[in-house]
């Protein structure tokens, strides 16, 4: 069955393969640069190469938002209605680019409807939102009904993570070098929560096992109606960790579906290698 609404997102969104297969979204690339070398994340550089280069590079890779022209190319599709999901506007100007492109496009094509959504999230959180919206599209919901549901999705989403290292935070100047190296040396892992479009450190744990346990506890303690909800586990080049969490959730909890995604170059720049993200909707 042909879908009535085209879904577009940006390259910061990290999809499980199952979601890509079901939704077939259009993805507007975001550039990631190692000094003079620039790539479109996910298209011109894969995860394995990215994490390898990031380990070797003394400076943090730089990401740059897509230009409005990049969005314009994707707006020129046959569907008359378009839903665009972007990385939180509190961390990126991607949302602004998408809105600017929308205004430019509608001047020439006033009969189309384009709705740009500031996800107030990123990575697997956006993938989850898109998966749920795709289900609504397939069930025949109108754009206005879907927009109402998106506001509820933003409120209901649970999104926690564990940073294995503060290396990228140190490189990016977000953490004092001495303090960051001390935290890494003591093997402390930072527990984060993604909420209201921001990444907030909420706890720490010593060692990988303890930190993953804490992240799962945060999910258990904050999620109701598990049987109606889907979980996506994101990993930054550490698939074994993701599989362990999936097995634990599968045995001990009762979610509708558990999926795994690789964290790509855009979000991987911020999380560093070894990070785990868990999102529930």
Image: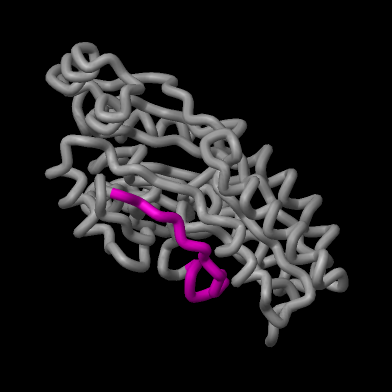
Q: Nearer the viewer, residue 276 or 250?
A: 276
Q: Is residue 53 above or below residue 19?
A: above
The x, y position of residue 99, in whole percent, is 70, 52
Q: Nearer the viewer, residue 38 or 30?
A: 38
Q: Specify whether residue 139 is painted magenta.
A: no
Q: Is residue 106 above or below residue 129?
A: below
Quadrant into which the N terminus falls? bottom right
Q: Nearer the viewer, residue 75 or 5?
A: 75
Q: Specify whether residue 26 is painted magenta.
A: yes
Q: Is residue 107 above or below residue 166?
A: below
Residue drawn at (56%, 64%), measured in percent from left and top? 70
Q: What residue range appears in magenta?
A: 19-33
The x, y position of residue 10, in whole percent, is 52, 57
User: What residue occupies the far bottom of the structure in this picture?
Assistant: 1
The x, y position of residue 31, in whole percent, is 40, 55
Q: Nearer the viewer, residue 186 or 246?
A: 186
């Amino acid at each position: 069955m042909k879908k009535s609404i085209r879904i577009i997102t940006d390259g910061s969104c990290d999809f499980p393969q199952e979601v890509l297969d079901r939704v077939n979204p259009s993805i507007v690339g975001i550039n990631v640069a190692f000094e003079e070398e620039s790539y479109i994340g996910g298209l011109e550089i894969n995860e394995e190469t990215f994490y390898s280069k990031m380990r070797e590079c003394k400076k943090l890779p730089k990401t740059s938002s897509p230009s409005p022209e990049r969005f314009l190319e994707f707006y020129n599709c046959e569907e008359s209605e378009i839903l665009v999901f972007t990385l939180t506007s509190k961390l990126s100007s991607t949302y602004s680019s998408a809105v600017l492109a929308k205004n430019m496009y509608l001047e020439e094509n006033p009969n189309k409807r384009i709705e740009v959504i500031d996800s107030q999230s990123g990575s697997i959180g956006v993938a989850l939102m898109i998966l749920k919206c795709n289900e609504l599209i397939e069930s025949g919901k109108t754009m206005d009904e879907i927009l109402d549901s998106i506001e509820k999705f933003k409120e209901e989403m649970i999104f926690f993570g564990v940073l294995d290292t503060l290396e990228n935070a140190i490189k990016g100047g977000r953490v004092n070098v001495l303090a960051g190296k001390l935290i890494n040396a003591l093997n402390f892992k930072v527990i984060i929560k993604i909420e209201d479009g921001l990444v907030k450190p909420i706890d720490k744990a010593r060692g990988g096992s303890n930190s993953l346990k804490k992240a799962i506890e945060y999910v258990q303690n904050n999620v109701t109606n598990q049987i109606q909800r889907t979980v996506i586990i994101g990993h930054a080049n550490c698939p074994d960790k993701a599989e362990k969490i999936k097995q634990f959730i599968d045995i001990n909890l009762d979610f509708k579906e558990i999926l795994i995604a690789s964290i790509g170059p855009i979000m991987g720049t911020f999380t560093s290698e070894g990070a785990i993200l868990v999102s529930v909707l």
